[in-house]
Amino acid sequence: MDVHKFFSRVKTFSHGIHPDAHKEETAHKTIRRTPFSPEIYVLLSQHRGAPARVIVKPGQEVVRGEPIAEAGGHVSVPMHAPVTGVVRAIDMLVPTVEGPKAEAIAIETYAAATQEVLYGEQRDISQMTPEELVQAVQASGMVGLGGAAFPSHVKLLPPEGRRIETLIINGCECEPYLTCDHRVMLEQTDRLIVGIRLLLRATGATNAIIGIEDNKMDAVAALNAALVGERRIRCEVVETKYPHGAEKMLITTLLNREVPSGGIPADIGLAVYNVGTVAQLGDLIPQGRGLIERVVTISGPGVKKPGNYLVPIGTPLHFLMQHVGSSMQASEVIVGGPMMGMTVASLDVPITKGVSGIVVLEKVKSNGGRQQVYPCIKCGECLSACPLHLNPSMLGQLAGIREYQVMAEQYNLDDCFECGCCSYVCPSNIPLTQYFRIAKSIVREARMAS
């Protein structure tokens, strides 16, 4: 077979980049459970929207799966106990990925407990109404597990006048090193399909498309085998290219449609869900349980035992590093993938619902922020890489003179989803993505103050 002819038929979008994948260390390793940390820290704000509200007290015993915080509003989700133990404290206890300490519930794990999930109630989801399904999704505490951590139930309720016609299930996992979604598609195929059917009923959508990059053909084969006779769900293979996992790019590739500037997929009749999110829904909703653990890829040259691990929410990074073994040369720990993730300043940071990966780099692999930054040479590489066809060069120059409002009003700063393509290709080592992240934060603060 002519490989070039094959790839010419694979769907894709314009621009983007092809970073080294670094997935070979974990792509073929099955999901394994980590031990339970002696202490768990459940952050009350680990999703978009309002923080959860505490419903337990220090000294109270909790069982694994029991609700410990309720949703703080419509755009919010509850928290559940990841372990059986006793609530030790509720306070500003641990740092977050962003840096400052945040309010958390500290649970001391009972070492002698079996850690069986003791909280939940079996449901017949085929008898549940769409409204009941939406309520069940919120009660499960589910958020987007691909990294955005947006409450999943909110996507099931499009704005007034909108209707979800098609579901897009995102199985691209384009970030280097990360393979947890790949393993979920292979090992939790049935759960994933149950979850898709549940979402179809909840939204009233007519069909669902699972988009998977062509470096995961074993996952495509597994899903196609499970979907024999299924008319409403199909797989589509897309080119392995970064950032195909971004919902806007996957929508463009699969349907040749564009989310309007400042809009959301529901504006064009779509809802996009990560495969890990949907597989968890397919498992939790029928059992009436809450989200208490997730699959996390732990990889990178600084990890001695890379793999895909089932990790309780709230597990401190230092405990995981002890379990997987970090090399003496490890110098940088990234939560998320190397393109869009964030380097942590402390290993006391706990795992949250949106953490899909931990990448540990060594001194020889990490620039540690030490690369010299040179002036922009107007080469245009960033323009050729930007998947949204923005002008990162001009945006970077405006950021340098603090013209943040001009960036937002004339150069579509808000459309940037901080994929990192521009920074990756810049020969001058200009940290464009970091500039844009700061600029967006300042613009948001100015809008809130006005």
Image (cartoon, rainbow, N blue to C red):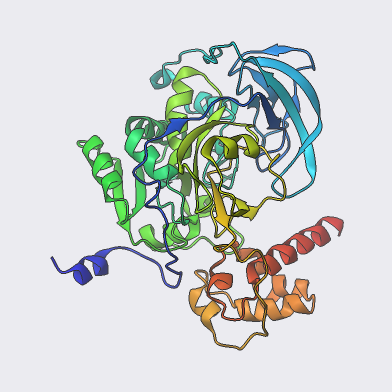
47 versus 291 height, above or below: below
320 lies left or right of 374:
left
Q: Look at the image and tell me whether residue 386 can be seen.
A: yes
Q: Farthest residue toward the front?
A: 328
Q: How many marks?
A: 0
Q: Is residue 266 left or right of residue 80?
A: left
Would residue 203 be visible to someone looking at this image?
no
The correct choice, above or below, for 76 with respect to 110 in the image is below
The vertical placement of 229 against 290, above or below, is below
- Report the front residue among 126 and 323: 323
Residue in front for this viewpoint, 59 or 109 = 109
Which quarter of the figure has residue 374?
bottom right
Residue farthest to the left, as pictured: 1
Answer with the quarter of the image where residue 240 lies.
bottom left
Toward the viewer: 201 or 288?
288
Residue furthest to the right in view is 449
The reply, left or right, for residue 236 in relation to residue 158 is left
Image location (x, y in percent) of residue 125: 42, 21
Q: Is residue 426 above or below residue 81?
A: below
Q: Position of residue 394 (x, y in %)?
A: 65, 81
In x, y percent, where is residue 426?
A: 57, 77
The N terminus, quarter of image? bottom left
**Which quadrant holds the C terminus?**
bottom right
How far across and how far down the image is residue 207, in percent? 35, 43
Tell me which residue sits at (26%, 40%) in the image. Answer: 222
Q: Is residue 298 left or right of residue 47?
A: left
